[in-house]
Image: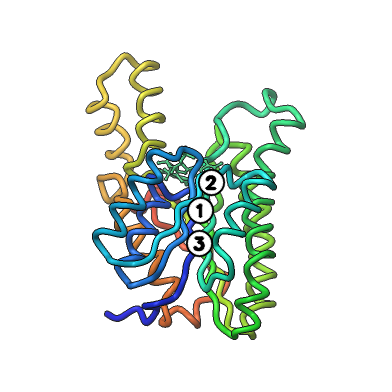
Amino acid sequence: MDLGIRGKKALVCASSKGLGLGCAEALAEAGVDLVMNARGAEALTAAAGGIRARWQVAVTAVAADITTPDGRAAVLSAAGPVDILVTNAGGPPPGTWSDWSRDDFLRAIDANMLTPIALMQATMPHMIAQGWGRVVNITSAAVRSPIAALGLSNTARSGLTGFVAGTSRQVAPHGVIINNLLPGIHATDRAVSLDTAVTRAKGITMAQAIAERAATIPARRYGDPAEFGAMCAFLCSRHAGFIVGQNILMDGGASNQNP
Ligand code: NAP
């Protein structure tokens, strides 16, 4: 299928690894020029170089913390006007309701709610002016089915989901389409760190921890960042203009299972 976005320009945040990289790779395969971002320059340069070589698209790499005003300013100024925005950043740490201070909540809200909102506010005026744009926010399956230990993430991402619910309907008349993509467990560094914690807590091997978790998922496996990226690219395509303000769950069926 031709996604119809060859030659457009996308800003893909937090994209040197994992789900962000999956999205960058799939957009590049569709012929989209990229602005990629992450904090660590080494992995970012390597990821950008690989994509440039594989897909012959233009790739600008900006090493910066996207959750800070200075980091966002650096990324947005290097990017200039973009047609497509994919928001992403690392998730907040796990814990218990009584652990979290006001500062912990403010950090999570800044990173996983106010940062994507600021990026949409910065990039959508150009999309509206040209009558075409696409935004995909990487959120979490926890928005649909809250994960108890991820209270900071549940809180911040629910706020973003609320913002998108209204805003997506306000900008759709101008050809700007916003949707959220909700990952369940995917095989990325984030999954490795979650599974490493399980190996320590239970005294089991990594293979056992992965097998135990996969057994709880109807698809009996972890998601692949490449299939996540393919869905992201579809939501950025010309075929997605009638999909507005949706929360699209990619979790192998893990949420809402009846016993
Ligand atoms: P990952 O494999 O750890 O990759 C995170 C990427 O984001 C890296 O490229 C990292 O590079 C970059 N990054 C992190 N914080 C950043 C920041 N402040 N500014 C710029 N770049 C930043 O993570 P992932 O699994 O792809 O997860 C992506 C998002 O999806 C996270 O918010 C995560 O909580 C959420 N999620 C993931 C899963 C899953 O199973 N993987 C499930 C549900 C939700 P640097 O470290 O160099 O900055």
Secondary structure found at label 2:
loop
Going by the numbered disc 1, the residue's amino acid type is Cys
Identify the residue shown where x is 73% and y is 38%: 106
Q: Is mark 1 within 8 Å of ligand 1?
A: yes
Are there few (<14), some (14-19), or many (20+) residues within 10 Å of tag 2?
A: many
State the residue position of label 1: 13
Q: Which badge, 2 or 3, comes first in the chain's sequence? A: 3
Identify the residue shown where x is 32% and y is 35%: 213
Secondary structure found at label 1:
loop
Q: Quadrant of residue 249?
A: bottom left
Q: Quadrant of residue 120?
A: bottom right
Instruction: Using the image, tell me which numbered label, if any, was put on residue 11.
Output: 3
Cα–Cα span, label 2 and label 3: 13 Å
- Kindly report which numbered mark, 2 or 1, lies closer to the viewer in this rendering: 1
Going by the numbered disc 2, the residue's amino acid type is Ala
Q: Nearer the viewer, residue 72 or 212?
A: 72
Query: In the image, residue 27 lies at what x, y percent?
Result: 37, 66
